[in-house]
Image: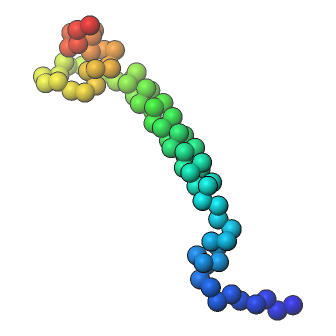
Amino acid sequence: MVRRRSTLPLSKRSMDTIRPSNWATNTAICVFGIGLATFGVWRLSASKEQRHIAPTRPIPSQRWSPQAKEIGVRQE
């Protein structure tokens, strides 16, 4: 059996099988997964952060670091 080769480019051939409605769902699932992983890594990093010397200027991690209150950088 001889296989006939299509003259259409690959992108034109595959346009018949794509369902753009799935793109939105798949993108939303991926964004949620990446966000969840980022949040987990951020929480782990914040819990392991240690400063041996108090910073001389304000830094963003002072807002969430539990150690910032202990060394007197953040008042609550």
Q: Above or below — where is 36 with respect to 64?
A: below
Residue drawn 56% across the image and 51% down it? 24
Image position, residue 72 (x, y; %):
21, 9
Q: Above or below — where is 13 with respect to 19?
A: below
Farthest residue toward the right?
1
Residue drawn 64% across the image and 89% down it? 7
Image position, residue 30 (x, y; %):
55, 46
Image position, residue 29 (x, y; %):
58, 44
Q: In this orientation, does residue 21 appear?
A: yes
Residue drawn 60% across the image and 78% down it? 12
Along the horizontal axis of the image, is 17 left or right of 71?
Answer: right
Q: In this orientation, does residue 71 appear?
A: no
Instruction: Tell me the colour scheme of the image.
Output: rainbow
Along the horizontal axis of the image, is 18 left or right of 62?
Answer: right
Along the horizontal axis of the image, is 39 left or right of 60?
Answer: right
The number of numbered discs placed on residues in the rendered structure image is: 0
Q: Above or below — where is 51 with respect to 72?
A: below
Farthest residue toward the left?
56
Depth check: give the residue in front, 4 or 57.
4
Depth check: give the residue in front, 12 or 5.
12
Along the horizontal axis of the image, is 71 left or right of 3?
Answer: left
Image position, residue 9 (x, y; %):
59, 83
Q: Above or below — where is 22 with respect to 57?
A: below
On the image, which quarter does residue 61 sit in? top left
